[in-house]
Amino acid sequence: MNTYGERLRTERLRLKMTQAQLADAGGVGRHAQSCYERDITLPRADYLSAITLLGIDVVFIITGRRILYSGAPALLRGNSHD
C-alpha cells in the first residue's frame, strides 16, 4: 500500500463499497474513480471532502498514516454548539 491510489482502494474496500458507489458519493463518475485508484489522476479537494463524510480516512489516503477516530466524525454525530 505505497501509493495514493492503493490507499484509496483500501479505504473503499474497508467500507465495502463499489467504485461506482464511492464515485457517486464523491461527485465524480466511475471512470474518474478508477483513474484515482490506478494513480492516473489525483482527486480534487471537493471529492476528498465529500468522501470524508462516509468515514473514509482521507489523511491515511494522503499521508499513509491512520487517524484514530472515537466514533463517527462530528458532522455525522449531529453535535451542535448551542
Image (cartoon, rainbow, N blue to C red):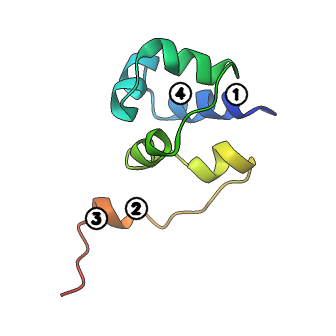
Residue located 46% across and 19% down the image: 19
Q: Which label's residue is closer to the chain start, 1 or 4?
A: 1
| Residue under label 4 | 13
Q: Do the residues under discs 3 and 1 have CB atoms within 8 angstroms?
A: no
Q: Residues within 10 Å of mark 1 (few under 14, many from 20)?
A: some
C-alpha gap between disc 1 and disc 4: 11 Å
| Residue under label 2 | 73
Q: Position of residue 59 (x, y in %)?
A: 63, 53
C-alpha gap between disc 2 and disc 4: 19 Å
Q: Which label's residue is closer to the chain start, 4 or 3?
A: 4
Q: Do the residues under discs 2 and 4 have CB atoms within 8 angstroms?
A: no
Residue located 60% across and 17% down the image: 35
Q: Residue furthest left?
A: 82
- Determine the secondary structure under disc 1: helix
Q: Which mark is residue 72?
A: none
Q: Do the residues under discs 1 and 2 have CB atoms within 8 angstroms?
A: no
| Residue under label 1 | 6
C-alpha gap between disc 4 and disc 3: 23 Å
Q: Do the residues under discs 3 and 2 have CB atoms within 8 angstroms?
A: yes
| Residue under label 3 | 77
C-alpha gap between disc 3 and disc 2: 7 Å
- Determine the secondary structure under disc 2: loop
